[in-house]
Image: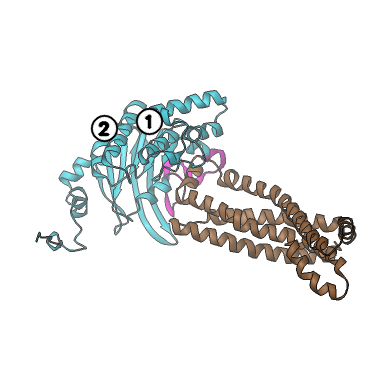
């Protein structure tokens, strides 16, 4: 992502002799916006759908009913562990995505003749800790949303194998829509908080 | 068939009505199931057999009336009171419903881990005893997907018996199984009924099974939304005047799709 953005930005910025600002573009957009957003969208496609399929299959096979008649709460037993896992892993994966984006940006910058230290200082100058933490807070919330909607759709599954497919599709679509809306709300909140 | 027990009523269904989205499926049902008996719920597809069972085990709340398990209304209580009732019975679901991510012995151990303070060694021992009871000790560490349909059913029976229930509810005991495996399961039910005096409530439409294991049966009907016959399987087969009951027990066609003479006539050329 960082590599593609840097490469595409390099062409117009070169006309103004402003290639150095590619570092600002990559640093800010990856850490504040694209890192958490792309990670969450990929997670919605990968893990949200998997949660919906797993729980949906359990519902169709009456395993959820079996839990209930054993006196075990399906939410505590099936949903809570998945949400906790997503809450911890999404910020970590976002950090990884941020790092990969920054490395991609550096690959383009170095091909334009900028040394690593220049890129590093420029990113450090452009990006505050607030941006990094703001991005990770978003990732934390996105993690909850992706896992919760995946599990919810799984538990709402009707009867038959077709219903599992519908739940899986619905988990991905609802997940991405929720992430996008929440991202918009974050943009407003961060604007008013001055993050 | 086993000897007819003469116990106290352990399940009482009183003026029970079931409805989905305002559409009544069963209306004003009343009957009692006695401790120690093997009780079968019969009827054609869509007559509400599984619906009745799911209300009995507390998955749904009745639209009217009540169902008492050992004198207590499962739909009217929550928390610890509900847990006390849930521990009195085990359920065998149509698909077995063993948890696919756990081995067989972990499945059987789960209720023991959740509801007892026993050490892990004791739990494993009890779980192994339950598996031995159903003849699956050798398969203890296999995953459910590695077991045949009949083995999955027996494993699910072992799990349902984990906490020594008084009642076992079984939804379609023989569904999807070959006749030999079905007969094996029938023998297992008879043996458990004899040795442990467990009350069985079985939803089925397998006639051989009904004759072998059931002390009493009720038959439900889709149009009537209620019970059309109650008694021993032999009584219903030999003495019922209701054509729907006779059709069921004598395996006659309903006539909805033409008479037997209208069946295709394949001739060799």
User: Residue A187's image quarter?
Assistant: bottom right
Q: Colour of chain A?
A: brown
User: Residue B198's image quarter?
Assistant: top left
Q: For mark 1, what is the residue?
A: B134
Q: For mark 2, what is the residue?
A: B4
The answer to whether B1 appears left or right of A184 in the picture is left
Q: Residue A195: x, y in percent?
A: 85, 61
Q: Is residue B62 above or below residue B72?
A: below
Q: Residue B65: x, y in percent?
A: 41, 50
Identify the residue at horizontal 73%, vertical 49% (top origin). Answer: A92
Q: Residue A120: x, y in percent?
A: 87, 56
Magenta run includes residue B72: yes
- Residue B139 in view, yes or no: yes
Chain coloured cyan in the rendered structure = B
Please, what secondary structure does the residue beneath circle 2 have?
A: loop
Q: What residue span does the magenta drawing correspond to?
A: B57-82
């Amino acid at each position: 992502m960082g590599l593609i953005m840097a490469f595409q930005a390099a062409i117009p910025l070169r006309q103004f002799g402003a290639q150095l600002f590619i570092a600002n573009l990559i640093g800010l957009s990856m850490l504040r916006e694209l890192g958490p957003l792309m990670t969450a969208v990929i997670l919605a496609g990968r893990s949200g759908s998997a949660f919906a399929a797993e729980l949906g299959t359990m519902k169709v096979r009456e395993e959820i009913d079996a839990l209930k008649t054993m006196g075990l709460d399906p939410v505590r037993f099936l949903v809570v562990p998945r949400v906790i896992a997503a809450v911890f892993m999404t910020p970590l994966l976002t950090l990884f995505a941020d790092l990969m984006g920054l490395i991609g940006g550096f690959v383009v910058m170095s091909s334009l003749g900028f040394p690593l230290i220049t890129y590093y200082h420029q990113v450090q100058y452009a990006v505050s800790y607030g941006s990094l933490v703001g991005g990770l807070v978003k990732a934390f919330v996105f993690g909850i949303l992706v896992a919760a909607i995946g599990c919810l759709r799984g538990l709402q599954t009707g009867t038959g194998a077709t219903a599992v497919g519908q739940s899986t599709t619905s988990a991905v679509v609802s997940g991405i829509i929720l992430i996008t809306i929440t991202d918009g709300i974050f943009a407003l909140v961060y604007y008013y908080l001055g993050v | 068939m086993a000897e007819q027990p003469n116990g106290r009523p352990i399940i009482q269904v009183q003026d029970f009505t079931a409805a989905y989205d305002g559409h009544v499926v069963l209306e004003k049902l009343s009957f009692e199931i006695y401790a120690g008996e093997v009780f079968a719920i019969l009827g054609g597809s869509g007559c509400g057999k599984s619906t009745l069972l799911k209300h009995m085990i507390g998955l749904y709340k009745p639209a009217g009336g009540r169902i008492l398990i050992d004198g207590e209304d499962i739909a009217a209580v929550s928390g610890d009171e509900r847990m006390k009732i849930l521990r009195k019975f085990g359920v065998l679901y149509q698909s077995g419903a063993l948890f696919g991510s756990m081995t067989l012995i972990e499945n059987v151990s789960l209720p023991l881990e959740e509801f007892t303070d026993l050490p892990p060694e004791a739990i494993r021992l009890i779980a192994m005893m339950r598996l031995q009871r159903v003849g699956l000790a050798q398969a203890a560490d296999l995953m459910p997907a590695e077991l045949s349909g009949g083995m999955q059913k027996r494993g699910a029976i072992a799990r349902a018996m984990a906490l020594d229930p008084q009642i076992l509810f079984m939804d379609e005991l023989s569904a999807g199984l070959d006749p030999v495996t079905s007969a094996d399961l029938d023998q297992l039910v008879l043996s458990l009924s004899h040795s442990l005096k467990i009350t069985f409530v079985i939803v089925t439409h397998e006639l051989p099974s009904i004759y072998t294991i059931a002390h009493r049966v009720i038959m439900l009907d889709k149009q009537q939304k209620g019970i059309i016959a109650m008694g021993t399987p032999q009584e219903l087969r030999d003495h019922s005047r209701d054509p729907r009951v006779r059709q069921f027990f004598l395996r006659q066609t309903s006539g909805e799709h033409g008479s037997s003479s209208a069946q295709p006539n394949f001739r060799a050329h």
